[in-house]
Image (tube, helix red, strand yellow):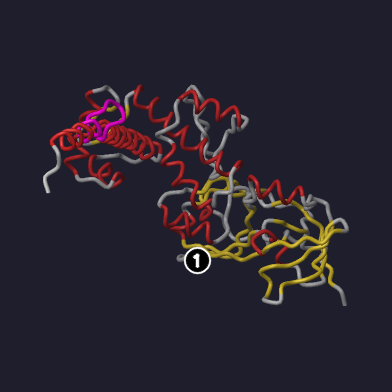
Amino acid sequence: MNLPWWIALFSLVALAAAFFWPRYGLRSVWREAQAHRARVQREDTLKHIYTLRAAGQSPTVQSVAGALQIDLGKAAAIIEDLEKHGLLSSTDGALALTDIGQEYALQIVRAHRLWERYLADRTGYDRKDWHREAERQEHRLTPEAMEALAAQLGNPRYDPHGDPIPTETGELRPLEGQSLASLEPRQTGRIVHLEDEPAQVYEQLMDAGLHVGMQVRVTDKDAQSIRFQAEGRPHSLTHFQAGSVEVQPLEAAPAAGPPPVTLAQIPLGGAARIVRLSAACQGAERRRLLDLGFIPGTQVKVVMRSPGGDDLRAYEVRGTQIALRREQAEMLLVDGGRLTADG
């Protein structure tokens, strides 16, 4: 059946409007998406070059292609465009940022690390997701939004991984730490930085429960691995994994008692005094535990556990019984030398 000419004409006009309408038409939306993608790739290239240079490595067109997961031709075109705009220079295949390029890259790094700090302090995002979410947001924050966020967070100096956050003027504090693998048996240290790349190693460190601020004591090491105690639990890492963990060596306390253990390690009927909350406990979860009365110095007793096992237990704190999941109890460190148990 043939449509009346005016319906066909109206349909064509509507289709053309949907495609060509300024700002909101499909053509404009597609162009904006392409422009955003191109800007993200340029900014990721600058950040990649900055990161490798900061680590003492030499970025190349091949490393850019690998980092951005694009072919060599596309990587070369991006580098050529950045060089044309005075953001980087290329000498014998080695890439280096100009002063303007360095300034630009540091602002991207600042946006990324500020957003990770925001996710850690103000949201319930799992810490395994911080880096991925910040990778998205770093390209969207305007300078004004970035400074408003910094002020809201109290102008933090470090992100939750221990990386220094560049200041508004691009100043960057140096990292002060050494590889965990450099510690010898019986040496202690405090974790000051966890490298979040490569992502696979970072996830392994997260699965092991390691976090910035954690105190570790090396018990043994050999050519394959390093073994240590942290928050009352034994850990073992390969030297490759330990290379992603930076620590500050600590002087051993002259009369140090048993190290703290987690509340989850207290047996049913046992009681202990809270020493501190784990540094891994941040944001809304930290505030909730403090509001419930799990404050350093408070005595806590294990009074009940779930019939299904230890995943859920009830604790008596300040005369009130409160149920906590195992992962919540693991965020509370108690005095390992003052554990008591009924009977």
**Horizontal relation, residue 123 to residue 92: left or right:** right
Residue 283 point in image, percent of width and height: 63, 45
Give the magenta part as a residue range: 15-26
Residue 139 point in image, percent of width and height: 40, 34
Most foreground residue, 41 or 190: 41
Most foreground residue, 256 or 108: 108
**Horizontal relation, residue 238 to residue 100: left or right:** right
Most foreground residue, 81 or 214: 81
Residue 3 point in image, percent of width and height: 14, 42
- Relative to 306, is 243 above or below? above
Task: Tally the numbered discs.
Answer: 1
Q: Please tell me whether residue 134 belongs to the stretch shown in magenta.
A: no
**Kind of residue indicated by mark 1:** Asp
- Relative to 227, is 8 above or below? above
Indicate the quadrant where residue 217 lies.
bottom right
At 86% from the left and 56% from the top, the residue drawn is 318
Q: Please tell me whether residue 24 belongs to the stretch shown in magenta.
A: yes
Indicate the quadrant where residue 27 lies.
top left
At 11% from the left and 45% from the top, the residue drawn is 2
At 12% from the left and 49% from the top, the residue drawn is 1
For the C terminus, the image quarter is bottom right
- Relative to 305, is 153 above or below? above
Q: Secondary structure at mark 1?
A: loop
At 84% from the left and 68% from the top, the residue drawn is 340
Q: Which residue is mark 1?
A: 222
Q: Residues within 10 Å of mark 1 (few under 14, many from 20)?
A: few
Residue 73 point in image, percent of width and height: 16, 41
Most foreground residue, 189 or 297: 297
**Horizontal relation, residue 268 to residue 222: left or right:** right
